[in-house]
């Protein structure tokens, strides 16, 4: 059920079906109390972070050591938002959906900058609405370790705190 304060779900039983012109309707009886549905597992932080990515395929060389990362050709992109579950980025290339990739981007926690290197699955790739010569890519993290996810989430909350503090004039 779509409501002003969110989306709710439950189990229902259809007790009557009807048609109003070309629209089919159903009279339903609720079987359980309504529960609010959280549509997103992680908070998305809007950002502009330079990133690099490498598409993995059957012909890709194995990546077993940090030295292997030096020998691959990275494509450039920019992260537009980031969450503990993945990223949205732009690049000059439209990529094939469902491909696995290796994503490299910097995050700062405290005074330390760290390059995160994460596996991801491309779940969408489409031309940008404002500039059809660049493509938006949506990437869902795959095989991410809990400690790396926690670093990303900590980075997001630190950045959001900075933004709120700046908006209040405390910085």
Image (cartoon, grey):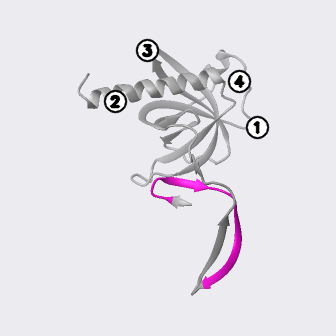
Q: Which quarter of the rendered picture does the C terminus lie within?
A: top left
Q: Who's the residue at 75% across and 35% down the image? A: 59
Question: Which is nearer the N-term, disc 1 or disc 4?
Answer: 1
Q: Who's the residue at 56% across and 32% down the image? A: 84
* Helix, strand or loop status at disc 3: loop
Residue range corresponding to the magenta coloring: 3-19
Q: Nearer the viewer, residue 157 or 136?
A: 157
* Residue linked to disc 3: 110
Q: Callout 3: few (<14), some (14-19), or many (20+) C-alpha neighbours within 10 Å?
A: few
Q: Could you say which quadrant of the image residue 61 lies in?
A: top right
In the depicted structure, whether residue 95 falls above or below residue 171: below
Measured as percent of width and height from the top left, residue 1 is found at 57, 60
Q: How far is mark 1 from mark 2, CA to CA?
A: 42 Å
Total count of labels: 4
Q: Is residue 71 visible?
A: no
Question: Which is nearer the N-term, disc 1 or disc 2?
Answer: 1
């Amino acid at each position: 059920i779509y409501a002003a304060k969110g989306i709710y779900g439950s189990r229902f039983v259809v007790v009557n079906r009807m048609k109003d012109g070309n629209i089919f309707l159903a009279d339903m009886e609720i079987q359980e109390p309504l529960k609010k549905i959280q549509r997103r597992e992680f908070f998305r932080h809007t950002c502009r972070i330079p990133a690099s990515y490498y598409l993995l395929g059957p012909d890709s060389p194995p990546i077993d050591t940090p030295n292997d990362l030096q020998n691959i050709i990275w494509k450039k992109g920019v992260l537009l938002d980031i969450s503990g579950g993945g990223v949205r980025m732009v690049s000059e290339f439209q990529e094939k959906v469902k491909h696995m990739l290796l994503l490299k981007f910097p995050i700062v926690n405290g005074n330390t900058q760290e390059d995160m290197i994460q596996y991801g699955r491309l779940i969408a790739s489409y031309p940008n609405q404002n500039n059809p010569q660049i493509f938006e890519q949506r990437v869902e993290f795959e095989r991410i370790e809990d400690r790396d996810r926690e670093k990303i989430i900590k980075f997001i909350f630190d950045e959001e705190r900075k933004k709120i503090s700046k908006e209040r004039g405390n910085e």
